[in-house]
Image (spheres, rainbow, N blue to C red):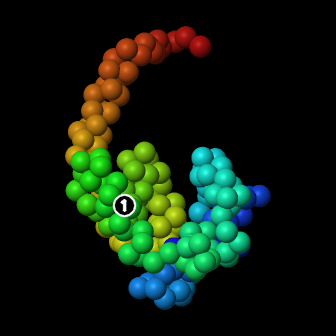
Amino acid sequence: MALKWACVDFLHSVIRVEASDWQGKLGPTKTGRARNIPMTQELRAALEKHRRHSSESEFVFCNSDGKPLRFTQIKRPLYAACRAAGLPEVQWHVFRHSFASQLVMEGVNLKAVQELLGHRSFNMTLRYSHLAPNVLSEAVETLTAASERAKAAPSLKVIEGTA
């Protein structure tokens, strides 16, 4: 909610997270450190379109008067979307957990996940990196696949006295 257009770098496809909004007060991030988040092509296109159709506010997400949105304004649409999808209501923060978990399940290095989330502590990143129930079963099944590949691979024979 504190994201400003000055922190959206379309040239390098990066968003610089350097501020947060906590209970309507703008300030530094929780850790006090800024971080760069790469944009996907899809996000970049969506933000470019949003920029063309948005007000002249310095804030990316704002009211028509240019002032930043408040938490009460962004939670109602989220709750409505959850109800429409037949899902339980969730808070916006749950998407940080989902982001971290999905990265981990796709094999992204935990250090990269830590940097993307902006955590100082590796333990905090681990708290965000929940695994889906099937991930452990799939991990064990990789051994079965490896065993099958080994069985299918031709064996080499070493014959003494030949060069």
For residue 147, above or below residue 40: above
Question: Helix, strand, or loop for circle 1?
Answer: helix
For residue 145, above or below residue 23: above
Q: Residue furthest front?
A: 64
Where on the picture, by quarter, is residue 48?
bottom right
Q: Where is residue 63 shown, x and y percent of the image?
A: 55, 73
Could you tell whether 38 is left or right of 30 in the image? right
Could you tell whether 130 is left or right of 33 in the image? left
Residue 45 appears in the picture as rendered: yes
Residue sitting nearer the eye, 75 or 136: 75
Q: Where is residue 62 shown, x and y percent of the image?
A: 56, 72
Q: Residue at x 53, y 87 (%)?
A: 27
| CA neighbours of label 1 inside 10 A, class few (<14), some (14 to 19), many (20+) | some
Q: Where is residue 70 shown, x and y percent of the image?
A: 45, 78
Where on the picture, by quarter, is residue 138?
top left
Counting labels gives 1
Mark 1 residue type:
Leu
Q: Where is residue 58 shown, x and y percent of the image?
A: 67, 76
Could you tell whether 55 is left or right of 145 in the image? right
Residue sitting nearer the eye, 161 or 155: 155
Image quadrant occupied by the C terminus: top right
Q: Residue at x 28, y 43 (%)?
A: 135
Q: Residue at x 24, y 41 (%)?
A: 134
Residue 32 appears in the picture as rendered: no
Q: Residue at x 60, y 47 (%)?
A: 42
Q: Residue furthest right?
A: 11
Q: Where is mark 1, residue-wise?
A: 78
